């Protein structure tokens, strides 16, 4: 019976992941990663329930730790994305690297005593579990879990202020969802259940979390692929790096400035000739020289069409200048 329950939980997690990959639009990499680790972890719990010896049980247990090691952290990252609380790139990289380091320690189970000092295979009816004595790094793992649980509560409770405005209903639902998940995990550890309830709870958490995430994706530019696609078809975009080397453009930009198709990528703007040099070269130089917002917007008339342009700076997550973008849209002049 328990094996069937774990199998159903695994299939539910897999269905969610397949939906996000196949039909979902606008899901971030961290949202998809959360679904991936839940699938792997649920697979581990199912494998543990059907294991027949110590080695099989250890391998399955190692898979289950993908949920414990990564789900709280990635769930926290997803919440910060919802609330628009920015995590510096270096810190996010450090967080992932630390969890991956702990996962490497999980691989030592049965070979070293840093995670489990000792481990034995046990079966009681249809319940399979490992009787183990924890090692020092398992304590570090537990600390990281409670740290991320605390950060989840702090962020969702509004202590950390973000820019994303979500409904009070969604904010309350997210807060109590996290509280419920944490409460179940802590209760399991205090009571010492032989049956792991966390894979079922994390599936439930993921399903409910997809409701506000789907709404945010639907009513945003980043999540609305159809709207973005229409905009890309109707507006021209031209990209340059920090040294003003041409880095590409979209089909509409090539239609407005045919000479772009002849330009070499990662090369300076050709010295003369063409519509771009006639209408946009000097405004671009002026904008870069002055870095003045008043020089970022302008227009010009080409044949019977007025072209509006906007110039901007392309920045990375750390706010460093990576290049420049020019957006062009056309307004046909009435006869």
Image (spheres, rainbow, N blue to C red):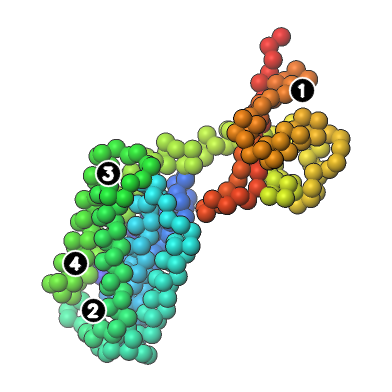
Measured from the top left, where is residue 174 in percent x and y?
A: 27, 48
| Picture disc at residue 128 | 2
Identify residue for label 3: 171
| 272 horizontally vs 244: left or right | right
Label 3 sits on a secondary structure element that is: helix
Comes first in the chain, label 3 or label 4? 3
Q: Which residue is at a point 81% across and 30% down the rendered structure image?
A: 278
Tell me the CA gap for discs 3 and 4.
Answer: 23 Å
| The N terminus: image quadrant | bottom left
| Picture disc at residue 186 | 4
Say if mark 4 contacts mark 1, CB within 8 Å: no
Identify residue for label 1: 302
| The C terminus: image quadrant | top right
Q: Identify whether 335 is placed above or below 15.
A: above
Comes first in the chain, label 3 or label 2? 2
Label 2 sits on a secondary structure element that is: strand
| 313 horizontally vs 74: left or right | right
Q: Residues within 10 Å of mark 3 (few under 14, many from 20)?
A: some
Tell me the CA gap for discs 2 and 1.
Answer: 75 Å
Q: Is residue 1 visible?
A: no
């Amino acid at each position: 019976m328990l094996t069937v329950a774990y199998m159903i939980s695994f299939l539910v997690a897999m269905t969610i992941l397949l939906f996000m990959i196949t039909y979902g639009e606008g899901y971030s990499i961290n949202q998809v990663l959360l679904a991936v680790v839940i699938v792997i972890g649920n697979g581990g719990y199912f494998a543990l329930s059907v294991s027949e010896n110590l080695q099989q049980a250890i391998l399955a247990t190692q898979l289950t730790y993908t949920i414990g090691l990564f789900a709280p952290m990635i769930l926290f990252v997803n919440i910060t994305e919802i609330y628009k609380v920015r995590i510096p790139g270096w810190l996010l990289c450090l967080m992932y690297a630390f969890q991956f380091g702990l996962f490497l320690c999980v691989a030592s189970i049965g070979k070293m005593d840093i995670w489990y000092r000792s481990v034995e295979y046990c079966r009681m009816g249809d319940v399979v579990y490992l009787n183990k004595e924890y090692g020092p790094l398992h304590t570090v793992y537990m600390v990281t879990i409670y740290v991320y649980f605390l950060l989840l509560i702090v962020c969702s409770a509004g202590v950390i202020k973000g820019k994303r405005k979500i409904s009070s209903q969604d904010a309350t639902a997210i807060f109590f969802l996290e509280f419920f998940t944490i409460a179940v995990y802590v209760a399991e550890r205090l009571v010492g259940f032989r049956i792991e309830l966390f894979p079922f709870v994390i599936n439930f958490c993921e399903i409910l979390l997809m409701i506000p995430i789907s709404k945010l994706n639907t009513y945003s530019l980043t999540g609305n692929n159809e709207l973005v696609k229409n905009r890309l078809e109707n507006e021209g975009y031209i990209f340059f790096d920090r040294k003003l080397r041409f880095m590409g453009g979209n089909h509409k930009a090539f239609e407005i400035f045919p000479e772009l198709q002849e330009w070499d990528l990662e090369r300076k703007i050709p010295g003369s000739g063409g519509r771009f040099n006639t209408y946009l070269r000097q405004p671009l130089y002026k904008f870069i020289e002055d870095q003045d917002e008043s020089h970022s917007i302008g227009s010009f008339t080409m044949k019977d069409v007025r072209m509006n342009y906007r110039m901007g700076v392309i920045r990375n997550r750390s706010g460093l200048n990576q290049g420049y973008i020019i957006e062009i849209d056309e307004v046909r002049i009435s006869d």
